[in-house]
Amino acid sequence: MTFPSDFIFGAATSAYQIEGATGRGRSIWDRFCDQPGNIADGSNGDVACDHVHRWQSDVELMAGMNLNGYRFSFAWPRLFPQGNQQSNAQGFDFYDQLIDTLLQKGITPYATLYHWDLPESLGDQGGWLNRDTPYRFAEFAEQVVNRFGDRVQHWATLNEPRCAAFVGHLEGRHAPGLKSIASALQAAHHMLLGHGLAIQSINRKDLDLGIVLDIKPYYPSTASADAQKAAQQGDGVFNRWFFDAVLKGQYPEDIWLGFAEDVPEVLESDMSIINAPISSLGVNYYTRSLVEWDGEAPFPNVKPVKNPQGRYTTMDCEIFPEGLEAMLVRLNEDYSLPNLYVAETGAALADQLENGQVHDPLRIQYLNGHLKAVANARKQGVPVTGYFNWSLMDNFEWGHGFTQRFGLVYVDYANQKRYVKSSGRWFAEFIAEQQLTTA
């Protein structure tokens, strides 16, 4: 497989998962972690990977792995500890230094404005259930881009609004820990509204502006009509609800009808705002869903089925690179896509540090398979311009705490030492070979 010389090979992180709390205000995730039972190992993001103090050596790691792209997020509470009131100069200085150093090393920054760490003060006012929050987010976005837009070309407004809304407001496994489908749908709508308002407020034609949505293909477990209907409805909730809104300016009618009285409040101009033109789209892919019909379950009546022949990560995700290729091709067929990049894909594995080494052959297979999936999609005309592995380093995996390891770099949390895994070395060699091939 070969990629063009300007293709981006990178790794991704998010602020709450790696930075640590030094020098920032509190977020809804700090409060969520305070509540016993919410995090698998009782941990929190107070220290995480201490990136706020170790960012220079972390950038050196990226350069040593030949990465030419790094996707990170701005911590809203680091820049505006109380929301959009008084700014924190030290927070802005931190990202100034990080961005300047990335550029000096030839690493292109891909910035995400919101990766789930809403300031606690805005959470206290209702968070994403409050229609005012999208407007506060747009103000935040404008101020951040005004400061860093002279050096950062690539911007995403939100990371995975589906996950933030549904896992945080329906499943209760993420902040703010609610369990209501109506709340999840309203939060999702307000996040998408915030995305559109942010695109409008930034209003920069010279920048690459977009959003990052997670994708998951749904496959019927049998040839029955019921299983196929379950797959269609599951796909509608997970994928079409968000892609149709952003790229078509409408929610899919079949799913809207399925949600019935739980649908969100949508004002007349909302959908045209959400449909604001974007120049790039990031997609996050981890696995597929194999499903059958469950008439006892609430809409979308989906019951997941485990593939008995499948290989699974420690997060119980089936390793299925074919699904990435299929989704990239399908999205390109179903929508008028701007430039597309894989913003996240990766595997959580039971990595062990032995004599300063971490051997993770399954992650190497994962990388190779998913890079091939991207190459195959490109051959079919899909405009994929980059691939970011999740994650650069092991980190705080939300409700799982520090029990799951996704990194190309192993982090020993007892002393914060970093060790490049076999997969990280493999990726570095792969990138170097690509650079030689296209030189």
Image (tube, rainbow, N blue to C red):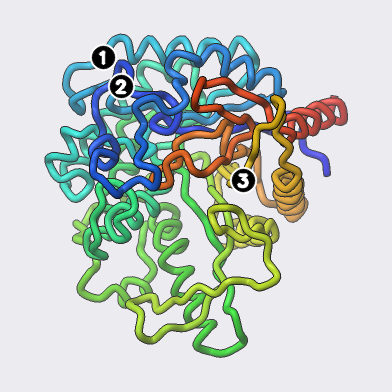
Is residue 340 among the parts visible in the rendering?
no
Q: Is residue 96 above or below residue 120?
A: above
**Front position among marks 2 and 3:** 3
The N terminus, quarter of image: top right
56 or 37: nearer the eye? 37
Q: Secondary structure at mark 2?
A: helix
Q: Which mark is residue 350?
A: 3
Q: Give the side of residue 224 with respect to residue 66, left or right.
A: left
Indicate which disc, 2 or 3, sits on the residue closer to the N terminus: 2
> Dot 3 surroundings within 10 Å: few (below 14), some, or many (20 or more)?
few
Q: Secondary structure at mark 1?
A: loop
Q: CA distance from mark 2 to mark 3?
A: 32 Å
Counting labels gives 3
Q: Which residue is mark 1?
A: 88
Give the residue type that dot 1 points to. Answer: Asn
Q: Which residue is mark 2?
A: 78
Q: Furthest residue to the front?
A: 355
Q: CA distance from mark 3 to mark 1?
A: 39 Å
Residue 70: give x, y in percent of width and height: 57, 27
Q: Are marks 2 and 1 in contact (CB under 8 Å)?
A: yes
Give the residue type that dot 2 points to. Answer: Arg
> Dot 1 surroundings within 10 Å: few (below 14), some, or many (20 or more)?
some
Indicate which disc, 2 or 1, sits on the residue closer to the N terminus: 2
Residue 357: give x, y in percent of width and height: 72, 29
Give the residue type that dot 3 points to. Answer: Ala
Indicate which disc, 3 or 1, sits on the residue closer to the N terminus: 1
Q: Is residue 50 above or below residue 244?
A: above
